[in-house]
Structures are given as structure tokens and as C-alpha cells.
Image (cartoon, rainbow, N blue to C red):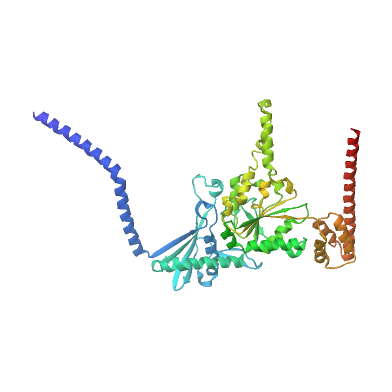
């Protein structure tokens, strides 16, 4: 009996132990997380209070790139510009400086190096700025735009330290003050730049790896509207249009349109399309982004190019009819579809693929991608941008590409007229009247000569050349151009006559 009772007690103990284990597992699964979070919250709260007693400083961190690394932070650039003055101060304590060229050719713009700290004062409060960077990620996680470039780029930051008692002053007044003053410094030191989308990866002015899709040089083109050979009335119309755009921020907001405008410059080679862009940039004081469309791999890359442009800029695609097969693209597609339906029964395995498939390794930018680039949702990112297309053959472009709303203003850059010639004579020869002007005026009505050719003939080639010799040379070239025009007309007339004779034979 005793052995039986002992066995029964042992079995009961085992059952109770199993029940306890199961209950513990259930309790941990059901309540453990909540209990841990509850305890963690309270411990963190007390830890923060203890830290506030030991360390009374608060911090604000400003990263170089906003979330997603899609666009460089304006706040970061403004803080960097603002700290230039404190960095250069004798008592600033900065020992390692970084230098880059300034607007003045003999000056340098200085900023503090990595892990340097500088103090600043604002209405009796002292704050400290620390510049630092973090190394690139070690993992192979792909970034939104492709992990290859992003993985190599250091993350740069500015960290602001201040006392907790100054919290309202720093957050409410000091930081807005920093941004305003930083913008003013950026405007003062600003150098206009000419950007290209070729070979954007490399080390930037701060000596750190940059993943920017743009490379740049200082924009120093001297062309202005004052020296642009163009009909004066048309030139004034363009200048007035540009001024209205530059001052139209409130208007564009009121009508609900993105603050951008498209210009289509078309005409024969040598009529001044590129110099017109330079004159527009100098007139508006804008940067220029020159896109080489054939080097853009996909529509997504094209979108990234647009996102990384700044306001107050002109985005240029020159000779767009030659850049990609965007000419009458939809008509070609329709014709290809019709031909495909007609020849479906004749296709054989191993047949030659279409050109689009053969060029799969090249640019895959489509007409749709370019249209979205011009006026899609992403085109509203930022503001005060002008988009310029140039072409020698406007008739080849798809109407959807150049309709109003995308290319808002169409400007024909035509052959040289007499008014444009007089401007060139004044600029190149410093003459406003000459006995050969009448001959030039008469010949320009009958001969086609571009402003570039006229300017070349007016350029002195030796110390012996003067206004008389240069104008005589121009008249001679205009007479040759006139003879070519007449010969061309006669040839067309003869062909037409031969065609009529052939019709009579039938």
C-alpha cells in the first residue's frame, strides 16, 4: 500500500510539473512581450531622467540626405554655408579646414573638416556644432537607386548640441535663423555651374566619395542677349517671357501649375540655338544642366537626374531628334503593329529581331519616360526650372513631345536677317553704317546665311583686315549663296518640267 501511494504521489507531481511548464510557456507567449515592453518603457523613462541630470545637453542631427537619399538636404547645405563664418573665426577652435574655390578667383570658401567642433552664440545662448561622417554600409542591401553607388558613399552629418534650458530658443528661433543666414551666404558665394550627367561618381570638393549623377564645371559662357544676333522684336519677346516666368511664383501657385516652363528652339544648324541657351542662363542667372540622353539607361535614371537638379536652373536636351528614337514614335509603333499583323503567318523561328531588341544593351529611355520627365508628377519636385529642347528638324518630333504644356514656347531660330546683321557688324567691327550695308540688306533677302556664317565673315583674320575688307568678304559670300539658291530653284523647275513632259507622253 505504501508503495502504491508513493507511486500515485509521484505521478501527481509529474502532472502538476507538466501543467506548470505548459502554463509558464503560455504565459510567456501571451503576456511576456507586453510585460517586457511595460518594464522597458519605465526603465527607459527613468534612464532618460537620470541622463538629463548627468548630461543636460540636447542634440539635433541634420543629415546630408533626406530619407531615401533621393535628394541632398537643403537644411544641410544651409548649415554648411552658415558655419563658414564661425569656422574662419580666430577663436573658433577649428584646426582642420577644407577649401574650395570661390566666386572671387583669388579667394577660397572654407569649411570645417570631419570631427571638428565649433561654438556659436545666439541671444546669450551658446551652442556647439559637430561635423562628422559615418562609413558606408557593410551589407549588400540594394538601395532604391541601386546599391552599387550608395554603398560607397559616406553619410555626412552636422550635430547641434545645446543646453536643455535653451530648448525653446534654439528650436524656435536659432535654427530658422541659421537657415536664413545660410541661404544668404549661399547666394553671396554662388557660382553658376554647367552640369553634365556623364561620370557623376567620384570625390567631391570635401574629399569624400559622392554618388551624385551630375558632374559640373563653372559656367562662364559670355553670350548675352545684348550680343545675340536675332530679330530685336523676337528677342524682346523672349526676354519678356523669361522675366514673367522668373517673377511668376505666385501666379503658378494660384493657377495650380508646377513652376516650370518649356522652350523648343528649332531651326537650321548655325542659327544660334546653343548660344540662345547661354544668353537665357546669363539673363536669368540660372545654372545649366545639359543632359546627354543617350547615356541615360532607363526612365528611372532619367527621373533621378531631374530630382537632383536644383531650382533656378535650365535643363537642356540638345538635338533631341538625334538623341533617341523619339521621332514620330507612336506612328512608327502603329505601323509596326500593322505590319506585324499582316506578316504573322510568314514569321519563322530564328527570324531577325526588331531593332529595339537588338539594342537592348543601350539606353531604354522611352517616349513615355521623356513625357513624364517634362510634365509628370515628378516634374513638380522643386520649382523655378526651365526645360529646353533643341532640334534641327522639328517636323520629325512626335507632336505629344512638343505640344503646349510641355514645350510652352516655340522659338524658331532662322537665317540671319538685316537687323541681326547690323548687330553683328556693331559687335564685330564697331560700325553702325557703311556703304556696303545696302548690298548686304538686298542679298540677305535672297540668300540664306546663318548668323554663325555671317559672324565668321565679319571676323578680322589678320591685322590688315578692317571693316571694308570684312564687309566686302561677306558680300562676296552672300552672292555665292544667292547663286546656289537660284541654281537650286532652276533645278527644281527643270525637274518639274521634265515630269510634265513625261505625263504628256502617256
Q: Is residue 355 left or right of residue 66?
A: right
Count the numbered circles shown: 0
Residue 328 in the image: x percent, y percent?
70, 43
Most distant residue in the bottom direction: 124
Residue 93 in the image: x percent, y percent?
50, 68
Q: Quadrant of residue 408?
A: bottom right
Toward the viewer: 470 or 220? Answer: 470
Toward the viewer: 374 or 150? Answer: 374
Q: Is residue 470 left or right of residue 318?
A: right
Residue 460 in the image: x percent, y percent?
85, 62
Residue at 71% x, 62% y is: 237
Residue at 32% x, 54% y is: 41
Judge whether residue 206 can be spotted in this image: no
Most distant residue in the left direction: 1
Judge whether residue 126 can be spotted in this image: yes
Residue 148 in the image: x percent, y percent?
55, 46
Q: Quadrant of residue 473?
A: bottom right
| Quadrant in the picture for the N terminus | top left
| Quadrant in the picture for the C terminus | top right
Q: Is residue 17 left or right of residue 187?
A: left
Above or below, 72 against 323 in this view is below
Toward the viewer: 152 or 200? Answer: 200
Amino acid at each position: 500500500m505504501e508503495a502504491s501511494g508513493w507511486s500515485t504521489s509521484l505521478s501527481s507531481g509529474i502532472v502538476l510539473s507538466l501543467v506548470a511548464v505548459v502554463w509558464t510557456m503560455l504565459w510567456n507567449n501571451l503576456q511576456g512581450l507586453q510585460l517586457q515592453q511595460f518594464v522597458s518603457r519605465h526603465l527607459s523613462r527613468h534612464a532618460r531622467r537620470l541622463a538629463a541630470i548627468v548630461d543636460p545637453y540636447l542634440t539635433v542631427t541634420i543629415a546630408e540626405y533626406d530619407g531615401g537619399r533621393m535628394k541632398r538636404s537643403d537644411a544641410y547645405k544651409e548649415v554648411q554655408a552658415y558655419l563658414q563664418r564661425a569656422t574662419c573665426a580666430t577663436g573658433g577652435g577649428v584646426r582642420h579646414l577644407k577649401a574650395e574655390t570661390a566666386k572671387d578667383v583669388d579667394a577660397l570658401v572654407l569649411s570645417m573638416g570631419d570631427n571638428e567642433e565649433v561654438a556659436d552664440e545666439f541671444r546669450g545662448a551658446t551652442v556647439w556644432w559637430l561635423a562628422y561622417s559615418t562609413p558606408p554600409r557593410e551589407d549588400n542591401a540594394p538601395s532604391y537607386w541601386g546599391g552599387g553607388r550608395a554603398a560607397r558613399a559616406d553619410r555626412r552629418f552636422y550635430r547641434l548640441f545645446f543646453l536643455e534650458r535653451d530648448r525653446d530658443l534654439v528650436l524656435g528661433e536659432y535654427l530658422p535663423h541659421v537657415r536664413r543666414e545660410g541661404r544668404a551666404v549661399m547666394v553671396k558665394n554662388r557660382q553658376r555651374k554647367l552640369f553634365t550627367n556623364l561620370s557623376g561618381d567620384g570625390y567631391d570638393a570635401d574629399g569624400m566619395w559622392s554618388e551624385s549623377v551630375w558632374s559640373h564645371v563653372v559656367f562662364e559662357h559670355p553670350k548675352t542677349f545684348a550680343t545675340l544676333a536675332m530679330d530685336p522684336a523676337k528677342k524682346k519677346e523672349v526676354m519678356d517671357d523669361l522675366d514673367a516666368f522668373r517673377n511668376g511664383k505666385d501666379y503658378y501657385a494660384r493657377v495650380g501649375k508646377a513652376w516650370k516652363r518649356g522652350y523648343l528652339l528649332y531651326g537650321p544648324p548655325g542659327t544660334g540655338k546653343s548660344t540662345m541657351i547661354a544668353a537665357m542662363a546669363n539673363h536669368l542667372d540660372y545654372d545649366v544642366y545639359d543632359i546627354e540622353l543617350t547615356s541615360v539607361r532607363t526612365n528611372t535614371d532619367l527621373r533621378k537626374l531631374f530630382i537632383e537638379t536644383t531650382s533656378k536652373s535650365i535643363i537642356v536636351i540638345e538635338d533631341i531628334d538625334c538623341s533617341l528614337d523619339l521621332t514620330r514614335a507612336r506612328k512608327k509603333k502603329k505601323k509596326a503593329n500593322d505590319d506585324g499583323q499582316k506578316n504573322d503567318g510568314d514569321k519563322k523561328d530564328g527570324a531577325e529581331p526588331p531593332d529595339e531588341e537588338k539594342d537592348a544593351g543601350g539606353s531604354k529611355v522611352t517616349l513615355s519616360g521623356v513625357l513624364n520627365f517634362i510634365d509628370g508628377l515628378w516634374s513638380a519636385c522643386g520649382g523655378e526650372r526651365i526645360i529646353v529642347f533643341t532640334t534641327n528638324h522639328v517636323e520629325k518630333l512626335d507632336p505629344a513631345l512638343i505640344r503646349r504644356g510641355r514645350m510652352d514656347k516655340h522659338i524658331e531660330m532662322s537665317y540671319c536677317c538685316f537687323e541681326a546683321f547690323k548687330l553683328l557688324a556693331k559687335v564685330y567691327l564697331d560700325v553702325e553704317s557703311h556703304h556696303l550695308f545696302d548690298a548686304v540688306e538686298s542679298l540677305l533677302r535672297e540668300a540664306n546665311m546663318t548668323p554663325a556664317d555671317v559672324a565668321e565673315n565679319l571676323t578680322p583674320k589678320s591685322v590688315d583686315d578692317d571693316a571694308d575688307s570684312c564687309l566686302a568678304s561677306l558680300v562676296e559670300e552672300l552672292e555665292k549663296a544667292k547663286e546656289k539658291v537660284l541654281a537650286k530653284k532652276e533645278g527644281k523647275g527643270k525637274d518639274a518640267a521634265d515630269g510634265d513632259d513625261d505625263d504628256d507622253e502617256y
